Image (spheres, rainbow, N blue to C red):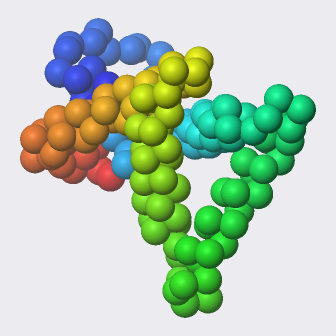
């Protein structure tokens, strides 16, 4: 969305290059993907630590990693062996995290701040998604002009 907004402001052309290609891709870069994965994992670890007794809190990261593997493995086992289950796994994991975040947001413990932050990021992304749907024709024109 930032690339689309930036494309509407004039920029002085650079003289040290022949061509500049700016494209709006629906896929994330590796940095964005790893950032979301780490954020998801840290949030899940906070939730697990919040429900464990104090002496077992150190096992929260391990339990979190195992929980993600069990959920994604179970979802992948439901379909074809050769199918790509990325979309289904993402929807299930984020759906479960939204449910867990809604529950932890109502708790009196400090973990509620982690939950509210997760819900706020999800809400901001939902708003950005709605804006991009409204701008889809303009974005498509820009992409076609850039040759993607």
Work out whether 85 lies above or below 122.
below
Q: Quadrant of residue 103?
A: top left
Q: Who's the residue at 86% across and 38% down the image?
A: 56
Q: Is 55 on the left or on the right of 8, as rendered?
A: right
Q: Position of residue 130 (x, y in %)?
A: 18, 40
Count of marks placed on residues: 0
Q: Position of residue 69 (x, y in %)?
A: 71, 62
Q: Is 125 on the left or on the right of 143, as rendered?
A: right
Residue farthest along the top direction in this orientation = 12
Q: Position of residue 118 (x, y in %)?
A: 47, 31
The residue lying toward the viewer, choosing from 44 and 29, is: 44
Q: Decide if residue 7 is in sight here.
A: yes
The residue lying toward the viewer, choosing from 49 and 18, is: 49
Q: Position of residue 139 (x, y in %)?
A: 19, 42
Q: Decide if residue 28 is in sight here.
A: no
The residue lying toward the viewer, choosing from 53 and 82, is: 53
Work out whether 67 lies above or below 15.
below
Q: Quadrant of residue 43?
A: top right
Q: Is 123 on the left or on the right of 141, as rendered?
A: right
Work out whether 140 lies above or below 5.
below
Q: Who's the residue at 79% across and 35% down the image?
A: 53
Work out whether 143 lies above or below 121.
below
Quadrant where the image shows the N terminus: top left
Q: Who's the residue at 27% across and 20% down the image?
A: 6
Q: Is 18 on the left or on the right of 109, as rendered?
A: left
Q: Who's the residue at 12% across and 39% down the image?
A: 135
């Amino acid at each position: 969305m930032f690339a689309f907004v930036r494309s509407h402001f004039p920029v002085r052309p650079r003289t040290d290059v022949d061509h500049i290609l700016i494209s709006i891709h629906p896929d994330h870069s590796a940095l964005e993907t790893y950032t979301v994965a780490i954020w998801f994992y840290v949030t899940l670890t906070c939730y697990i630590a919040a429900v464990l007794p104090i002496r077992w809190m150190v096992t929260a990261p391990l339990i979190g990693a195992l929980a993600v593997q069990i959920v994604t493995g179970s979802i992948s086992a439901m379909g074809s062996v050769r199918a790509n289950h990325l979309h289904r796994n993402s929807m299930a994991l984020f759906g479960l995290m939204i449910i867990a975040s809604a529950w932890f947001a109502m708790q009196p413990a400090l973990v509620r701040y982690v939950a509210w932050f997760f819900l706020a990021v999800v809400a901001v992304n939902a708003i950005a998604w709605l804006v991009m749907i409204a701008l889809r024709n303009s974005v498509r024109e820009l992409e076609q002009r850039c040759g993607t």
